[in-house]
Image (spheres, rainbow, N blue to C red):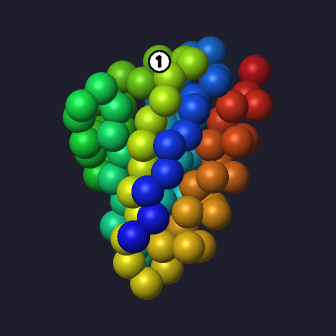
Amino acid sequence: MIEEKFKITYQNGLQARPATKLVSKANSFQAEMYMEYADRKVNLKSIMGVLSLGVPGDSKIRITFSGKDEDDAYKAISRIISDINEMV
């Protein structure tokens, strides 16, 4: 299992467009992934779950990865979060 903290610096946070990118990438892996924010935990493969967290810009989240392709999932999700943080 991999557990990592990420910072969302994108000013609009994880609203529809970046959340969709994140969930789409998560769904391309078999590993289970969960996102935590403000003492709530949701399945990273659920768009409604991710949006329900209401993660604003300049916030820290925690994501856990577990399963046979967890390393690849971790690397891919890290890249997507970097891409989200570079959005304008």
Q: Is residue 8 left or right of residue 2?
A: right
Disc 1: which residue: 56
Q: Is residue 24 above or below residue 41?
A: below
Determine the residue positioned at 73% across, 28% down.
87
Q: Position of residue 3 (x, y in %)?
A: 43, 57
Q: Tell me if residue 58 comes above or below residue 35 in the rendering.
A: above
Q: Quadrant of residue 1?
A: bottom left
Residue 84: name its quadrant: top right
Residue 47 seen anywhere in this rendered image of the structure = no
Which residue is located at x 50 percent, y 23 percent?
59
Q: Residue at x 56, y 46 (%)?
A: 21
Q: Nearer the viewer, residue 67 or 83?
A: 67
Vertical position of residue 20 compared to residue 17: above or below: below
Q: Position of residue 24 (x, y in %)?
A: 50, 55
Number of marks: 1
Q: Is residue 79 left or right of residue 18?
A: right
Q: Tell me residue 74's x, y (percent).
A: 56, 63
**In which quadrant of the rendered view does residue 88 lie?**
top right
Residue 71 visible to an observer of this rendering: yes
In front of the other: 86 or 71 = 71
**Label 1, residues with CA under 10 Å away: few <14, some 14-19, many ≥20:** some
Estimate the x, y position of residue 27 in percent, counting from the top left.
Answer: 44, 63
Q: Residue at x 44, y 36 (%)?
A: 61
Q: Amino acid at mark 1?
A: Pro
Secondary structure beneath label 1: loop
